[in-house]
Image (spheres, rainbow, N blue to C red):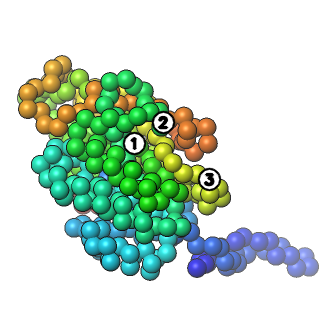
Amino acid sequence: MRAADKECKIRFTPGHAELVQENVDVPSRRVLVTGATGLLGRAVYKEFQNNAWDGLGCGYSRARPRFLRCNLLDEEALRGVIQDFQPHVIVHCAAERRPDVVERHTEAALNLNVHVSATLAKEAAGIFLIYISTDYVFDGRNPPYGENDAPNPLNLYGKTKLEGEREVLRHNPEAAILRVPILFGEVERVEESAVSVLWDLVQEGSDSCTIDHCQQRFPTYTSDVARVCRLMAERRLQDSSLRGIFHFSGKEQMTKYEMACAMADAFNLPSSHLIPLTEQPAGAGAQRPHNAQLECSRLVLLGLSVEPTPFKAAIRDSLWPFLQDRRWRQTVFH
């Protein structure tokens, strides 16, 4: 399949030079993005679309009208999408990524995080598959963690994602695993990200509130992850040896309390009502690693990494539509 593009040329005639545009045929590069309605999937789809890729995004409950509605648990439907679109690259963003939800709905999480990933890997023979995984495959006791360090997940979410990694590589050894930490970016609602969910606590400055100041995190901007996915895809089209496990992460180490204070500072809001919680309360949900910092040298050595966007700049871009006096803008931008 080929697509039309424009090429500028200078046409000379005696005594005259004219700049003209001519249609040229360029190869069509096709990418299939699962979970395209989600926080990361939207950013990945947008990044590829903005860089001359022919993209198809799959979603389910929020798919229409922008994306294709596809139940990934339906193997026949998934096979049909791949056969009809014939992508060169698949970026598998769809997952149940909320640790506490995984603990409560384990079977559904296993189906999506493990079984769908295995099916996709089998159906993607001859296609470059990027499986999005997590820093939660590590226990957080001895950071930083390189791509070859032994995983030891503490919670069911990390275990399902690790099992998904293994299934992907078992059925499709040519695939790539991209592990990322806690994500934030452009959201449809602030509850969509474990970072942006702090925003209402920041804005509602009349009452004091406690925020976790124990777990060390590395908040990572979805637009940066999306760019890494595109760079990996474009390299793979040139170099078939690109495969295996990769890490990408933001560089700024923060607790959730420090994220909230940084948000307040980014928008010139007070933060004196935010109180650091230095001990984990009992019954706080699924166990999280204390510090699962990812060491990202493999992407750097291959020239495929990007410089992470500074947290304050990225959070301003992500959350300004949710300022209390600008909520009307959500209808325009989201």
Residue at 44 percent of width and 80 percent of height: 84
Question: Is 242 in front, or is 331?
Answer: 242
Mark before the other along the chain sequence, 1 or 2: 2
Residue at 66 percent of width and 77 percent of height: 25
Q: In this view, does 68 lie to the left or right of 85?
A: left
Pointer 1 and pointer 2: residues touching (CB < 8 Å)? no
User: Mark 2: which amino acid?
Assistant: Asn
Report x, y in % for residue 102: 18, 48
Q: Which mark's residue is nearer the viewer, 1 or 3?
A: 3
Q: Which mark's residue is nearer the viewer, 1 or 2?
A: 2
What residue is shown with label 2?
148
Secondary structure type for disc 2: loop
User: Mark 3: which amino acid?
Assistant: Ser
Alpha-carbon neighbours of circle 3 within 10 Å: few (<14), some, or many (≥20)? few
Disc 2/disc 3 C-alpha distance (Å): 17 Å
Disc 1/disc 3 C-alpha distance (Å): 22 Å
What residue is shown with label 3?
241
User: Mark 1: which amino acid?
Assistant: Val
Residue at 42 percent of width and 27 percent of height: 144
Alpha-carbon neighbours of circle 1 within 10 Å: few (<14), some, or many (≥20)? many
Report x, y in % for residue 155: 22, 39
What residue is shown with label 1?
180
Disc 1/disc 2 C-alpha distance (Å): 15 Å
